[in-house]
Image (spheres, grey):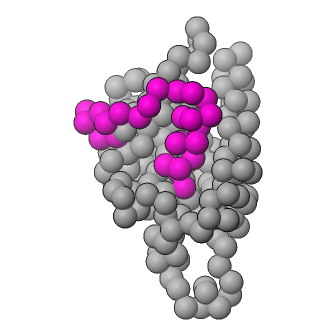
Amino acid sequence: MIFLLIGLGNIGKNYANTRHNAGFLCLDYLQSELKLEPFGEDSKFLAEVSTTKINEHLKLVLAKPTTFMNRSGQSVHLLQKFYKISSDNIVIIHDDLDIELGNWKYHVGKGPRGHNGIISVEQHMNDILFGRFRIGVENRTQAMKDNMSGRDYVLGTFTASEKTILTDTVFPQIKNKLETLFTNQNE
């Protein structure tokens, strides 16, 4: 069985530590913690990819689309088609401004809630029955909300303390949930 994990984000140094790249950052964390192969550019998938065999029954493919966020669906479609993966073995990891920093939600089959990366994925897959980790990035005061658009905020960089919350709390919790998903899929 093949399990596909896709982190959403924008490519390039200007976006590397932005809130909108929470999906990429989470995959980097997982790649490091699980001691997986380094990410390598794979133009046939329009993505940076890391693959590994977890055990004799499970192959894990991590992918970071290189298409920019709003075109992520192109990459997801190419990966799904090549590996012949059903949507229930695909999990997308992305930022979510509707969730407070330090929190996350996992669900299957929910709509995009205005997230352009997810809209693109749904359009290219013709399906919404994939898993999603929505990583909370909202950490603005009311005054900040009044003076800064959500778009500008997610394109801003994480502070050091915000990034620590992700790497010390959120990402380890997501890793644990993924291990449960792998175990359940393997049975």
The reply to whether the magenta stretch includes residue 38 is yes
Dividing the picture into quarters, in which one does residue 139 lie? bottom right
The reply to whether the magenta stretch includes residue 134 is no
**Name of the residue lying farthest toward the front:** 160
Location of the N terminus (image quadrant): top right
Q: Residue at x 62, y 59 (%)?
A: 163
**Is residue 124 among what the camera can see?**
no
Residue 82 location, x and y as percent?
A: 34, 25
Which of the pair 159/76 is nearer the observer?
159
Q: Residue at x 66, y 46 (%)?
A: 171
Which of the pair 24/84 is nearer the observer?
24
**Name of the residue lying farthest toward the top:** 56
State left or right for residue 91 relative to residue 177: left
From the viewer's perspective, is residue 172 above or below residue 159?
A: above
Q: Residue at x 62, y 48 (%)?
A: 133
Residue 98 location, x and y as percent?
A: 64, 68
State left or right for residue 66 relative to residue 90: left
Residue 37 location, x and y as percent?
A: 47, 26
What segment is highlighted magenta in the picture?
Answer: 22-47
Location of the C terminus (image quadrant): top right
**Is residue 157 among what the camera can see?**
yes
